[in-house]
C-alpha cells in the first residue's frame, strides 16, 4: 500500500554543484518547499498553462478527464528570498508536480520555471535535492517522462544518473522518453547491464539467479 508522503513544509535551500547556496544572477538564494493548499492555483496556474504550450502539447477535444489515481499530486514551489529573509519577500520562481506511483516510486509529472530563473542551474539543483529527499523518504526509484527532444530537461537528468528506458507515442505530446533512476546500486547495475553499458560479471549473474 502507498504510504502518506509529505513534501517539506519549511523552505529547503538549493545548492550549486560547488556546494554554495544557489543564487540567481539578479540576487536571492533559491529555496523549495511543498506548497500550501490552493497556492499552486493562485500563483502558478498561469505558468503551468504557459509551460504546457511551450511543450508543444496539443489541446484535446473539450472533454473533462478525471484522474482516478489513488495518490494525490504533490505540489512543490521554488522561490528566492529577498535580503530580509522574511516570507513576504519570497519571489515565486516556479513549481514541480509529483505523484507516488506504486509503493516505492515517485514520478515527476511537470516542472515550470519563470523565464528569469531558467538557464542558471536551478533545475539541476532541484533534481539533486529531490533525489536526496526521495531516498530519505523511502522511495526506491524516481521516474519521469519528457518529450524526446526536450534537452533542457533531459540533459540535467541524464547527468544526475537517470537512464532512458523506452520511447512511446502520446497523442498530446508526440514521442516521449521514459526515464528511470533506481537508488539501489544493484538495481542500477542490472539496468546498466540490460541496456548494454555494463558487462555481465559474477555480481550480475548472482543477482539474475537469486
Image: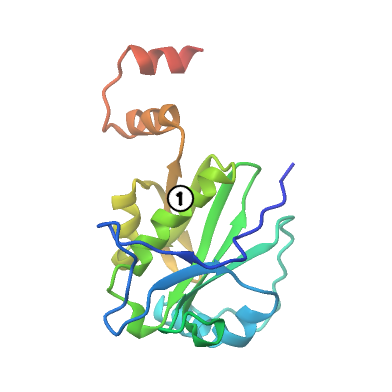
Task: Please rate how many residues cluster around mark 1, counting C-alpha atoms within 10 Å: few if below 14, some from 14 to 19, many from 20.
Answer: some
* Residue drawn at x 45%, y 80% as measured from the top left: 81
Q: Where is residue 165 in the image (x, y as percent from the top left)?
A: 40, 44
**31 vs 76, nearest the viewer:** 31
Up-down relation of residue 123 to residue 187 (above or below): below
Up-down relation of residue 100 to residue 151 (above or below): above
Up-down relation of residue 6 to residue 56 (above or below): above
* Residue drawn at x 70%, y 61% as measured from the top left: 72
Left or right: 15 with respect to 130? Answer: left
* Residue drawn at x 34%, y 45% as measured from the top left: 161
Up-down relation of residue 100 to residue 183 (above or below): below
Q: Could you tell me if residue 141 is visible in this image?
A: yes
* Residue drawn at x 61%, y 58% as measured from the top left: 99
**42 vs 152, nearest the viewer:** 42
Label 1 sits on a secondary structure element that is helix
**Rendering quarter of residue 87:** bottom right
Q: Could you tell me if residue 61 is visible in this image?
A: no
**Rendering quarter of residue 39:** bottom right
Q: Where is residue 27 in the image (x, y as percent from the top left)?
A: 32, 82
Where does label 1 land, which residue?
A: 131
Which quadrant of the figure contains the N terminus?
top right
Q: Where is residue 9 in the image (x, y as percent from the top left)?
A: 62, 65
Amino acid at each position: 500500500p502507498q504510504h502518506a508522503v509529505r513534501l517539506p513544509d519549511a523552505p529547503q535551500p538549493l545548492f550549486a554543484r560547488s556546494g554554495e547556496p544557489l543564487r540567481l544572477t539578479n540576487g536571492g538564494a533559491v529555496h523549495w518547499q511543498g506548497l500550501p493548499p490552493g497556492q499552486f492555483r493562485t500563483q502558478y496556474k498561469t505558468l503551468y498553462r504557459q509551460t504546457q504550450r511551450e511543450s508543444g502539447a496539443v489541446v484535446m477535444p473539450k472533454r473533462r478527464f478525471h484522474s482516478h489515481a489513488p495518490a494525490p499530486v504533490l505540489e512543490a514551489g521554488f522561490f528566492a528570498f529577498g535580503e530580509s529573509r522574511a516570507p513576504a519577500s519570497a519571489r515565486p520562481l516556479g513549481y514541480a508536480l509529483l505523484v507516488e506511483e506504486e509503493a516505492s516510486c515517485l514520478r515527476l509529472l511537470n516542472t515550470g520555471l519563470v523565464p528569469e530563473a531558467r538557464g542558471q542551474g536551478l533545475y539541476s539543483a532541484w533534481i539533486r535535492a529531490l533525489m536526496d529527499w526521495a531516498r530519505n523518504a523511502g522511495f526506491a526509484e524516481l521516474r519521469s517522462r519528457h518529450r524526446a527532444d526536450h534537452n533542457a530537461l533531459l540533459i540535467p537528468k541524464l547527468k544526475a544518473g537517470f537512464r532512458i528506458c523506452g520511447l512511446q507515442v502520446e497523442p498530446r505530446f508526440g514521442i516521449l522518453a521514459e526515464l528511470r533512476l533506481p537508488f539501489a546500486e544493484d538495481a542500477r547495475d542490472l539496468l546498466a547491464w540490460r541496456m548494454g553499458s555494463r558487462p555481465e560479471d559474477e555480481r550480475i549473474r548472482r543477482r539474475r539467479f537469486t
